Amino acid sequence: MALPQFSQPALSSRELWNLDLIRRHDLSGPRYTSYPTAAQFRDDVEESAWRSAMAQSNARGKPLSLYVHIPFCSTICYYCACNKIVTANRARASAYLDYLYREIELQAALVDTDRPVHQLHWGGGTPTFISDAEMRQLMAVLRRHFTLVDDECGEYSIELHPGELPPDRLWLLRELGFNRLSMGIQDFDPRVQQAVNRFNSLEQVQELVDVARRAQFRSLSMDLIYGLPHQSARSFQQTLDAVIALRPERLSVFNYAHMPNLFKTQRQIDAETLPAPEEKLAILEQSIEQLLHAGYVYIGMDHFALPEDALARAAAAGDLHRNFQGYATHGNCDLLGFGISAINAIGDSHFQNHKSLAPYVADLERKALPLAKWVSLSREDHLRRAVINALICHFAVDFATLESEYSVDFQRHFSAELQALAPLEKDGLLSVDDRGIQVLPAGRLLIRRICMVFDAYQQQGREEAAAPRFSRII
């Protein structure tokens, strides 16, 4: 077995889809945008730990990735599990931005700002909730404190709600330096939109796409959700046909996890209207077949891209990465996050801000960073993170590479994990030999299940009978 195998022939839906294996291995588990996951963050954080981590980060000198969380939405989407503030009062954003600027200044004061910013992402909420003048000011503040790069070097993206954005505003976003757009489509079916209180027509999206092409955005990403009320394989096929005709460079097809006990807004959804498990699987199988037939490449974990897009090229070249925003083309970065709930991944530590506005503001009023939780990564955490990232980005683990980097005998160190993989290997999800692990086509949709074997925290908590914190794999 040659490892790692990055550039492989295009897979068919028949190779990826095995209903029996999916039913057998469809557990609840993390999405692994980080390891350790946010569930392992502790609340004993002190600013001195952040300062120490930042000093370590500066010494290593990696490029930077900046994330800005703008939590405001004018209306509520019932399925949403994001950290948001629903309000029609646009003035609330102005006060929030004042505190956001304070946080940016506090962090930047201890950052080697000569380090280039290879990634920038504004998320939410709905980042375009703020006015044109506020967007200009926010970008000016970021440029004043950090070294933003030119259009060819960086990937600068922003999330938008296509039902609420006048197309002409895209010219402003392009002028500010954004070169990628992420649109939350979810579903075009009017009945589904009514049930989840999320409205955007095909005509609105088509107009945005037309302007985005004229404005020369490098990449368009569209998000869809399967498992919403009133969806069926037939209705979702129509939505996906319309989206494919728009030809976005990237597409995500996310599983809706109905967890009203954790997310209050989901209580607005009538569980009786959700598609049955069999129908939900039929929607996903059909979507995979449609997208592969249309020429999209399966990147992994809900994500597809056109072969010429940077994400697909990175996957083919073995340069794909994963961070708190998902799959990324620039992964060798330290992450600085600003705003409520935002996460820093610097040095050997992860830090998360307060999720609520009141404590966030209170800390900044006393000129302290608004830190709520953190986790410090051990050497074992780093090793396991490397294994999980290799699986989730490359579908392969090369023992020699990790043995060289971490000075371990992989098969001895992970003897229990390799034994736990044996049933998965027997089921045809992967193959293991003396050189490494190769995920087989039938295992790609179940990659989270494979990663969970190497998650020490998942193994420690298997006996706990607490309510599930994670969505199901499929």
Image (cartoon, rainbow, N blue to C red):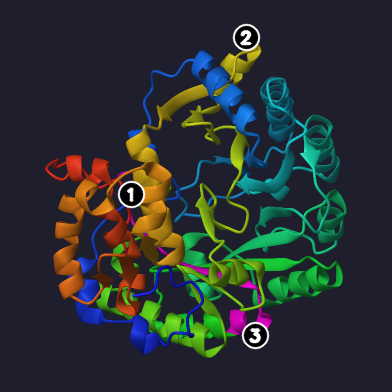
**Residue 384 relative to residue 181: left or right:** left
Q: Position of residue 213 (x, y in %)?
A: 80, 73
In which quadrant of the rendered view does residue 114 lie?
top right
In which quadrant of the rendered view does residue 55 lie?
top right
Q: Give the alpha-carbon distance from disc 1 to disc 2, as whole Å.
A: 36 Å
Q: Position of residue 388 (x, y in %)?
A: 37, 53
In this view, 163 is above or below 8: above
Please rate how many residues cluster around mark 3, counting C-alpha atoms within 10 Å: few if below 14, some from 14 to 19, many from 20. few
| Amino acid on which disc 2 is placed | Arg
Please rate how many residues cluster around mark 2, counting C-alpha atoms within 10 Å: few if below 14, some from 14 to 19, many from 20. few
In magenta segment, residue 40: no
Which of the two residues, 222 or 330, is positioned nearer the viewer here?
330
| Amino acid on which disc 3 is placed | Ala
Residue at image mark 2:
366
Q: Give the alpha-carbon distance from disc 1 to disc 3, as whole Å.
A: 34 Å
| Amino acid on which disc 1 is placed | Pro
- Looking at the rendered structure, the secondary structure element under dot 1 is loop
Q: Which mark is residue 260?
A: 1
Residue depicted at x 56% and y 27%: 357
Q: Mark 1 or 3 closer to N-term?
A: 3
Q: Mark 1 or 2 closer to N-term?
A: 1
Residue depicted at x 69% and y 26%: 111
In this view, 378 is above or below 33: above
- Looking at the rendered structure, the secondary structure element under dot 2 is loop
Q: Mark 3 or 2 closer to N-term?
A: 3
Q: Give the alpha-carbon distance from disc 3 to disc 2, as whole Å.
A: 52 Å
Q: Which mark is residue 245?
A: 3
Q: Which mark is residue 301?
A: none
Which range of residues does the magenta coloring cover? Answer: 242-263
Residue depicted at x 59% and y 66%: 314
Given contact means CB atoms under 8 Å apart, are the residues at marks 3 and 2 in contact?
no
**Residue 192 relative to residue 182: left or right:** left
